[in-house]
Image: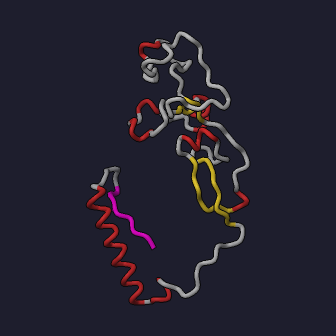
């Protein structure tokens, strides 16, 4: 049983008000259902997980095995899944955000340039196991283009991107 509360069009709700309203609606429905059929809402036998369903960890960005960078960026997901779809491949979609990324022509205009670090004149490339010094990552341009061809991260609100930078 579930309750959805929202608009049919793309408009944000006042989360504090509607969250309380949704909880109240759900509690009302659940209590009424319990009054009609207690065994339906509180069965004596616990649900048994079907065979072949496992709790697995995967990369929420790629659907594959999580990588060190995807874990650090918060893309690691725990979920129940049909074991036959368990991730087999590890795809690294992220790279540490370095003071100068190679696709920016003018270092003075680089939004990724971190004050007090490399001014962009030295060519710094991330190493295979390099940790992000500033805790930030960027999605590799080739991965972004191949998996999300119509996504423009530069148009996204920074607070929604978390540790990801365009």
Q: Position of residue 124 (x, y in %)?
A: 59, 18
Q: Position of residue 24 (x, y in %)?
A: 31, 72
In this image, 108 relative to 12: left or right? right
Q: Give the overall secondary structure of the magenta segment.
A: loop
Count the numbered circles shown: 0
In the rendered image, which quarter contains the N terminus?
Answer: bottom left
- Residue 47 on the magenta span: no
> In this figure, which colouring scheme has been used for the structure?
secondary structure
Q: Give above or below for 117 relative to 35.
A: above
Q: Position of residue 56 (x, y in %)?
A: 65, 58
To which quarter of the image does residue 19 belong? bottom left
To which quarter of the image does residue 50 belong? bottom right
Q: Position of residue 25 (x, y in %)?
A: 33, 72
Q: Give above or below for 107 relative to 97.
A: above
132, 34: nearer the viewer: 132
Instruction: Pick out the residue farthest to the top.
Output: 121
Q: Give above or below for 98 relative to 71.
A: above
Q: Give above or below for 90 relative to 9.
A: above
The residue located at (34%, 69%) in the rendering is 23
The residue located at (67%, 64%) in the rendering is 54
- Residue 6 on the magenta span: yes
In this image, 109 relative to 140: left or right? left
The residue located at (64%, 46%) in the rendering is 66
160, 73: nearer the viewer: 73
Residue extent of the magenta highlight: 1-8
The residue located at (33%, 78%) in the rendering is 28
């Amino acid at each position: 049983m579930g309750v959805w509360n929202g608009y049919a069009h793309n408009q944000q709700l006042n989360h504090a008000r509607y969250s309380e309203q949704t909880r109240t609606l759900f509690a009302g429905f659940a209590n009424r259902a319990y009054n009609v059929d207690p065994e339906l809402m509180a069965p004596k036998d616990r649900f048994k997980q079907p065979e072949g369903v496992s709790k697995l960890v995967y990369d929420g960005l790629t659907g594959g095995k999580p990588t060190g960078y995807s874990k650090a960026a918060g893309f690691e997901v725990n979920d129940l899944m049909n074991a036959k779809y368990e991730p087999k491949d590890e795809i690294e979609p992220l790279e540490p955000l370095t003071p100068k990324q190679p696709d920016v022509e003018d270092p003075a205009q680089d939004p990724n340039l971190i004050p007090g670090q490399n001014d962009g004149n030295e060519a710094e490339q991330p190493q295979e196991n390099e940790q992000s010094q500033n805790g930030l990552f960027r999605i590799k341009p080739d991965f972004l283009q191949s998996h999300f061809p119509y996504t423009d991260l530069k148009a996204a609100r920074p607070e929604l991107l978390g540790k990801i930078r365009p």
